[in-house]
């Protein structure tokens, strides 16, 4: 069993998917609005299992990523338990994301390229914080934002894998698998809201992109090609909306496919820019 858990494929796919499924289900039973917190919680659990618990204060960008993600999860859980929504929730999310990005990026801001990367990341963070999601009876529909997170994490993980950034690739793919676990819980019928906890998980994908762009030699600019995934909810409104269980299941699957397509384009571009060479990982 220990050898199985040490396999990189298991660590970045099967393990986080299982952990995510368990945590989403457990949080659903504990307090239904907290179900989406299982995505970020699953990421943190797998991080600690695979990389280890970072020191505090953290000396590395990955350590900062872990503790910033933990702080974001705590903020999201408190907000969802308290029922904080709307502009206040968005403002809190924006402050956390901006502070986390600056904390992670500060040691790398020694060039114009790094500053431009930070500006792009801050703009993406602002979209994540303030973009309005689709709501049904006052509850944010989870499929589109979770699919967007799945796509962004896949793009970061695939790009990092091609660029031989193993730890970033593993954690980004683990986040994608955890999001996949949440999507499975909400298919064919949506059971949960996305809430601030879910949006924090999307913010973690942005933080992973920051570590990749600022601290590796990977062609991280291709991640711009994955940003249309953030519009999955808006694009989904133009897709046929089926009636009944089968129709709703098909609609959710279509939204997920639409979200993932830009991620595949980004990964393909990263592979092409690498000269078509496979990663040693």
Image (tube, rainbow, N blue to C red):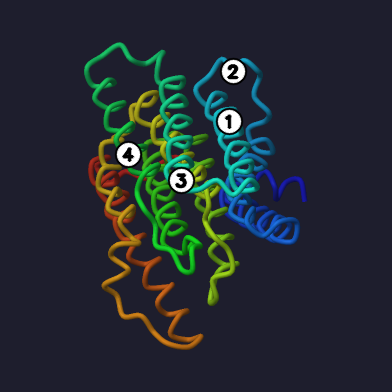
| Residue position for label 2 | 58
As displayed, is residue 164 above or below residue 4? above
Q: Position of residue 45 (x, y in %)?
A: 67, 41
Quick one: label 2 or label 1, which is nearer the N terminus? 2
| Residue position for label 3 | 202
- For mark 2, does the 10 Å Cα neighbourhood hold few (<14), some (14 to 19), or many (20 or more) residues? some
Label 2 with label 1: CB-CB less than 8 Å:
yes
Which element is circle 4 on? helix
Q: CA distance from mark 4 to mark 1?
A: 20 Å
Does residue 223 appear left or right of residue 98 in this picture?
left
- Quarter of the image where one finds residue 161: top left
- Report the mark closest to the observer, 3 or 1: 3
Q: CA distance from mark 2 to mark 3?
A: 22 Å
- For mark 4, does the 10 Å Cα neighbourhood hold few (<14), some (14 to 19), or many (20 or more) residues? some
Q: CA distance from mark 3 to mark 4?
A: 10 Å
Quick one: label 4 or label 1, which is nearer the N terminus? 1
The tag on residue 162 is none
The tag on residue 66 is 1
Q: Position of residue 102 (x, y in %)?
A: 41, 21
Q: Residue at x 36, y 24 (%)?
A: 214
Q: Residue at x 57, y 42 (%)?
A: 76
Q: Position of residue 260 (x, y in %)?
A: 36, 60
Residue in front for this viewpoint, 46 or 201: 201
């Amino acid at each position: 069993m220990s050898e199985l858990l040490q396999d990189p494929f298991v660590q970045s796919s099967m393990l986080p998917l299982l952990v995510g499924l368990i945590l989403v289900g457990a949080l659903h039973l504990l307090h239904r609005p907290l179900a989406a917190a299982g995505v970020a919680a699953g990421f943190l659990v797998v991080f600690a299992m695979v990389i280890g618990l970072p020191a505090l204060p953290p000396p590395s960008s990955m350590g900062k990523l872990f503790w910033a993600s933990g702080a974001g999860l705590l903020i999201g859980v408190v907000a969802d338990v308290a029922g904080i929504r709307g502009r206040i929730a968005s403002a809190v999310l924006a402050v956390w994301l901006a502070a986390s990005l600056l904390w992670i990026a500060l040691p790398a801001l020694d060039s114009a390229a790094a500053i431009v990367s930070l500006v792009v990341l801050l703009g993406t963070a602002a979209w994540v914080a303030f973009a309005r999601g689709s709501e049904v009876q006052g509850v944010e529909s989870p499929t589109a934002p979770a699919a967007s997170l799945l796509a962004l994490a896949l793009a970061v993980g695939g790009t990092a894998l091609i660029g031989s950034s193993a730890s970033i690739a593993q954690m980004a793919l683990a986040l994608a698998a955890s999001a996949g676990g949440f999507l499975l819980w909400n298919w064919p019928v949506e059971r949960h809201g996305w809430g601030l906890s879910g949006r924090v998980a999307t913010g973690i994908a942005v933080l992973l992109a920051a570590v990749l762009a600022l601290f590796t030699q990977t062609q991280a600019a291709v991640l711009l090609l994955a940003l249309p995934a953030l519009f999955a909810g808006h694009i989904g409104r133009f897709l046929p909306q089926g009636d009944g269980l089968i129709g709703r299941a098909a609609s959710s699957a279509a939204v997920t496919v639409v979200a993932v397509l830009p991620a595949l384009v980004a990964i393909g571009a990263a592979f092409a820019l690498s000269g078509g060479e496979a990663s040693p990982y």
